[in-house]
């Protein structure tokens, strides 16, 4: 018994009922011949990559963005900027987008809105992460102190 059984012709009939598919197939057969179309069909990779495309963890992207924006806002404040957030977002926009995209009308406004949403959420998550780190450090300090007391006895 084989693991993969061949599909029966009756399974293909509903596909060939679509006039657009039938027309495309007829064009291919007319152009290249039946044998070439069959050989090409056998070589086609039919494995679908399922699920969402792989990308970095959006949680860490937001936290990293919030950290980056805070860092550069401090630099702009140190230089005496009256609008450190706006200057930082402008710097980020210029780094991420080329001249052609920057000229498109409304592109910066859309970018600014999306970045602001990500930054606000990332800032919350960064604050929570820092609070958890502080609590963990407190707990570790207590554990170290308790271990020292036990070692002295």
Image (cartoon, helix red, strand yellow):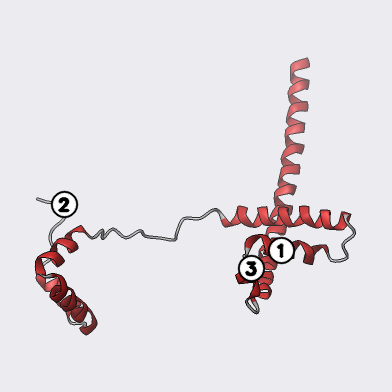
The C terminus sits in image quarter: top right
Q: Which mark is residue 3?
A: 2
Q: Which residue shows up at 73% across the image and 30% down it?
A: 143
Determine contact: label 2, label 1, CB under 8 Å. Answer: no
Q: Which residue shows up at 73% across the image and 48% down it?
A: 130
Chain-order first, disc 2 or disc 1: 2
Q: Which mark is residue 99?
A: 3
Along the line of sight, the residue nearer the viewer: 37 or 132: 37
Which tag is nearer the camera, tag 2 or tag 3? 3
Determine contact: label 1, label 3, CB under 8 Å. Answer: no
Left or right of 145 on screen, residue 101: left
Q: Which residue shows up at 21% across the image and 82% down it?
A: 18
Q: Residues within 10 Å of mark 3 (few under 14, many from 20)?
A: few
Cα separation, mark 2 vs mark 1, equals: 52 Å
Residue 111: image quadrant is bottom right
Q: Residues within 10 Å of mark 2 (few under 14, many from 20)?
A: few
């Amino acid at each position: 018994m084989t693991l993969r059984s061949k599909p029966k012709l009756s399974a293909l009939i509903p596909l060939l009922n679509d006039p657009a598919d039938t027309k495309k197939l007829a064009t291919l057969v007319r152009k290249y011949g039946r044998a070439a179309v069959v050989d090409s069909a056998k070589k086609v990779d039919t494995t679908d990559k399922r699920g969402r495309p792989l990308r970095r963890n959006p949680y860490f992207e937001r936290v990293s963005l919030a950290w980056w924006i805070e860092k550069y806002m401090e630099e702009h404040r140190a230089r005496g900027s009256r609008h450190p957030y706006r200057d930082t977002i402008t710097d980020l926009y210029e780094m991420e987008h080329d001249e052609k995209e920057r000229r498109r009308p409304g592109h910066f406004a859309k970018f600014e809105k999306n970045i602001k949403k990500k930054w606000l959420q990332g800032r919350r998550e960064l604050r929570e992460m820092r609070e958890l780190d502080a609590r963990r450090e407190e707990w570790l300090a207590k554990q170290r102190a308790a271990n020292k007391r036990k070692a002295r006895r």
